[in-house]
Amino acid sequence: MAVNFNSADSRISEGVWLFNEGEFFACHDVFEDLWSELVGPEKPFFQGLIHAAVCLYHFEGSNLSGARRMYSSFRAYVADFAPEFCGIDVARLQQDMEFCFEELLAVSSGYPHGLFLRLDRIPHIHYVALPGK
């Protein structure tokens, strides 16, 4: 059943919280539940957040080719939503994801052996600061 988009949907804050806790599979589930109901122009944004969670899940599990593939689709899906959407700092998420995936993306040929998700590079989703806050 398609619904009108509600930027205050509790699944958004739940998905962000799960992402920031490193619960990437659960985050994926929450955002996918929301995404499956959407039909408007916001749908690709949530597809991008799903792919962000999935690429980190793959990276964490050493599925490096899957991580790289999902990272690329994350970038494509959220590109038109920067610098912010739904109160989320999309530009910062893009930068932080790029930093996280920097070493993996630097491998230009062959399978990227020996790389792992570095805890000090795991991105978080940040909200845009409201003026005066």
Image (cartoon, rainbow, N blue to C red):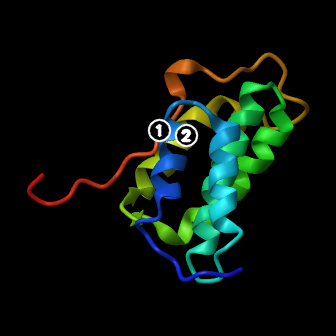
Q: Amino acid at mark 2?
A: Phe
Picture residue at 56% right of the left edge, 19% below the top: 119
Residue drawn at x 14%, y 60% is 131
Query: Which residue corresponds to mark 1?
Result: 124
Q: Is residue 75 visible?
A: no
Instruction: From the viewer's side, name the closer residue of 99 and 20.
Output: 20
Outermost residue, top direction?
114
Q: Amino acid at mark 1?
A: His
User: Looking at the picture, does residue 37 appear above or below residue 109?
Assistant: below
**Mark 2 Cα within 10 Å, few/some/many (few <14, many 20+)?**
many
Check contact, mark 2 vs mark 1: CB within 8 A: yes
Image-quadrant location for residue 113:
top right
Image position, residue 105 (x, y; %): 70, 38
Q: Is residue 12 above or below residue 105?
A: below
Q: Nearer the viewer, residue 2 or 78?
A: 2
SS class, disc 2 = helix
Q: Residue at x 71, y 69 (%)?
A: 36
Q: Which residue is mark 2?
A: 19
Q: Residues within 10 Å of mark 1 (few under 14, many from 20)?
A: some
